[in-house]
Image: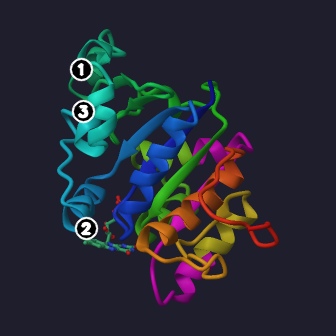
Amino acid sequence: MQNIVVAMTGASGSIYAVRLLEILLAAGCRVHLTISKSAVLVLDRELGIRVDLKNFKIHQLLPDEGDLASDSALRTLAPDRSSFSDLSSVFAETTAGSLVYHHYEDFGAGIASGSFLTSGMVICPCSMGTLASIAGGHSENLIQRAADVHLKERRKLILVPRETPLSSIQLENMKRLADAGATIMPAMPGFYHTPRSIQDLVDFVVGRICDHLGIAHRLFKRWGEEE
Ligand SMILES: Cc1cc2nc3c(=O)[nH]c(=O)nc-3n(C[C@H](O)[C@H](O)[C@H](O)COP(=O)(O)O)c2cc1C
């Protein structure tokens, strides 16, 4: 089972992250999820989704998966980490993949260390604030630290920023991260697949993220693909 880290931060576009989680779980991945405080505000504002960061349950984010993930499959992964007792990870199995939630302040989580093996990390959506912190190497929370780890370990780090227009500072931060090995994949859907709905636009962006993670999908018709 592939370990993939997904971090949600406070940029607009939380719908992309929710869809990405659905697709990765359906593909059988083990998703390590972490969510910033600002992402909680955006989730509520844009999707009416209420997430409790200290008492996270999968059904708060994915109601359908919440039905599938039996209560007995929900368990604390790290009960012995007393210093993080109020931040302990939560594990949920779905019919295909599984989700491990980590509080964004839990530096004791496996994903904070290079010795924990993953197939990559996606920050979706990625705020300009988080992007700047990673570009500066600050590692001030688990999201920034895990991103730093992926860069230093030369593993896949996909950033999905959403902002417009962009200042020269923001552009320079993106250039710095791209030079360090990150993939900058702005939430910028194409229109050549003739989208008919918001879902089509969302699936285009999520599909391109999956392409870079090596996850097979049929989220959109590719250019040059037969009808
Ligand atoms: C409703 C809402 C929408 C926002 N949209 C964006 C956005 O599209 N891009 C961005 O960079 N910041 C956006 N912000 C601001 C960030 O949330 C803010 O800079 C925050 O400090 C980022 O923190 P984080 O990176 O830890 O999540 C938005 C904030 C709110 C409340």
Image coordinates for residue 181, horizontal then vertical, percent:
73, 57
The quadrant the C terminus occupies is bottom right
Name the amino acid, label 2. Answer: Glu
Name the amino acid, label 1. Answer: Ser
Image coordinates for residue 142, horizontal then vertical, percent:
42, 42
Element type at mark 1: helix
CB of mark 2 near ligand 1 (< 8 Å):
yes
Which quadrant holds residue 214?
top right
The first of marks 3 and 1 along the sequence is: 3
Q: How is the image coloured?
A: rainbow
Cα separation, mark 3 vs mark 2, equals 19 Å
| Mark 3 and mark 1 residues within 8 Å of each other at the beta carbon | no
Cα separation, mark 3 vs mark 1, equals 16 Å
Element type at mark 3: loop
Which quadrant holds residue 163?
bottom left
Element type at mark 2: helix
Question: Measured along the vertical axis of the image, is residue 209 above or below residue 202?
Answer: above
Disc 3 crowd rating (10 Å Cα; few below 14, some 14-19, many 20+) is: many
Q: Which residue is mark 2?
A: 46
Q: Which residue is mark 3?
A: 57
Q: Is residue 103 located in the magenta-colored stretch of the structure?
A: no
**Which mark is on residue 85?**
1
Residue 26 seen from this side: yes
State the residue at coordinates (45%, 44%): 22
Residue 136 seen from this side: no
What is the magenta range?
148-172
